[in-house]
Image (cartoon, rainbow, N blue to C red):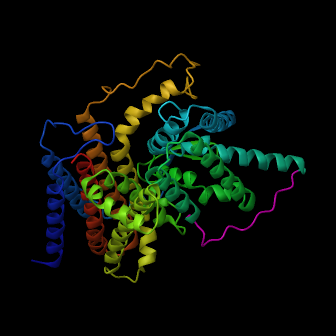
Amino acid sequence: MTRHARCVAGAALALIAAGLFPSDAGAHGLVGRADLPVPSWLFGWAAAIVLVVSFVALATLWPKPQLQEPVRRPLFRVPSIVDTLTALIGVGLFALVVYSGFAGAQQATVNFAPTFIYVHFWVGLVVLSVLFGDVFRAFNPWLAVGRAASWTFHRAFKGREARHLAYPDWLGRWPAVVGILGFAWLELAYVNKDDPSRLAILSLVYAGIQLVGMALFGVARWSQDGDAFGVYYNMLAHLSSFERIGRVLYARRPLSGAPRLRLVAGSVALLCAAIGSTTFDGFSNGPVWSSTTPHLQTFFSDLGAGSLNAVQWSSTVGLIGCVLVIAAFYWLGVLGIRTVGEGHAARELAGRFVHTLIPITFAYALAHYFSLLVFQGQAGGYLISDPLGHGSDLFGTADIRINYNVVSTNAIWYVQVGALISGHVAGLVLAHDRAVSIYRKVQDATRSQYWMLVVMVGFTSLGLWLLSAVNQ
């Protein structure tokens, strides 16, 4: 058996193992495990077959890069009034979050702030970014305030531009990494995460930090790399078939935006942090963490931490551990690719292939939070009429209740598994396309993708295991 054949056989066996790995899968959060019309093991085998076929098809039918150069078609020009309206809506929603957090009832279920932040903002914008492009940029409230302040300064000083510090190249997207990890810690480790008044305070603190960053480095420059949520949603928007350049909205080839992700410091860390935080959210609801966390809490209690701090510190360890595991697995794949040759350094390859993590980030988020978005997202209907939880009915929707029959548990399971499979297939496509653009020989490009295939198999197995572990 040739070396090429052994590699293909090994990859196929790994994928078959991935198909056998998950015994069953369940929906996240609000719904229980469904009795599926087909055995769950069949989904694992189907996932393995899809990935095997995709890998073989790419190796044989995709000899030249197809996605590296943008292919766009202009759709229409966006009127300037749209930017003004979306900016006002964004600022208004931010003001409502802060006001409801301070003035509203301090129960999370009846206050507008917690549901909007954790469901509509954190999860809903992920889906909107992939479907329609960089939606958040249009509604970004602190960006709107920063632009207004810059415009006012420009007019007040008769066209004079404010002087800003040069943004350091080494800083890159690291401020965004810190911001995403901070939000993940708030969601997954902080014991008072759903306290409306504390969320209002933290929202103001974050907005204040963004305005300071814009004042120091300029509105456009800081928003490009320093605003955690702006950077995160923009990276996801690279998967979208829509792109806005200036005032013109373009349609582009699916996935063709991802290869043009700017390679700056912190990009790998940001995507690993996003995937790792979602991983810990699922892992923390499973039996392994349930049996481990009491020992961690006892350890921190013995060090003098109170009961609440022991819980927070334990979750912090778990969160950091999951992020490091994701990063280590990606770097293992990169180090494997480096063995193919042609003198590419590991750091260079890590940057060249980092965009392949974008569809995996989306797949993990959609698979994990889909049920939360579908069900708890409906709460926005009555919360918008009664944002303070004081019994008002501003828009006549206060009597709306969550319909748990809007989507069946089986359908949720299909969406979750489908998201994982399609996300990892997209990652394979992006990796192969980048490989054939880097290596001079197609054979070397294919050999390099054995390692990326292992990465995708690992992420698929982990994602399916997390879905199954939640309900065990």
Q: Nearer the viewer, residue 2 or 171?
A: 171
Q: Is residue 159 above or below residue 132?
A: below
Q: Which residue appears at 38% of the width and 38% of the height? A: 372
Q: Nearer the viewer, residue 295 or 115?
A: 295
Q: Is residue 450 left or right of residue 84?
A: left
Q: Is residue 306 visible?
A: yes
Q: Nearer the viewer, residue 315 or 143?
A: 315
Q: Is residue 112 left or right of residue 353?
A: right
Q: Is residue 241 visible?
A: no
Q: Which residue appears at 69% of the width and 44% of the height? A: 144
Q: Provide the major secondary structure of the magenta segment.
A: loop
**Magenta region: which residues?**
159-173
**Going by the picture, which residue comes out furthest to the left?**
1
Q: Quadrant of residue 331?
A: bottom left
Q: Provide residue 380's location: percent of width, then percent of height.
A: 49, 29
Is residue 460 on the magenta stretch? no
Q: Quadrant of the N terminus?
A: bottom left
Task: Give the number of marks.
Answer: 0
Q: Quadrant of residue 197?
A: top right
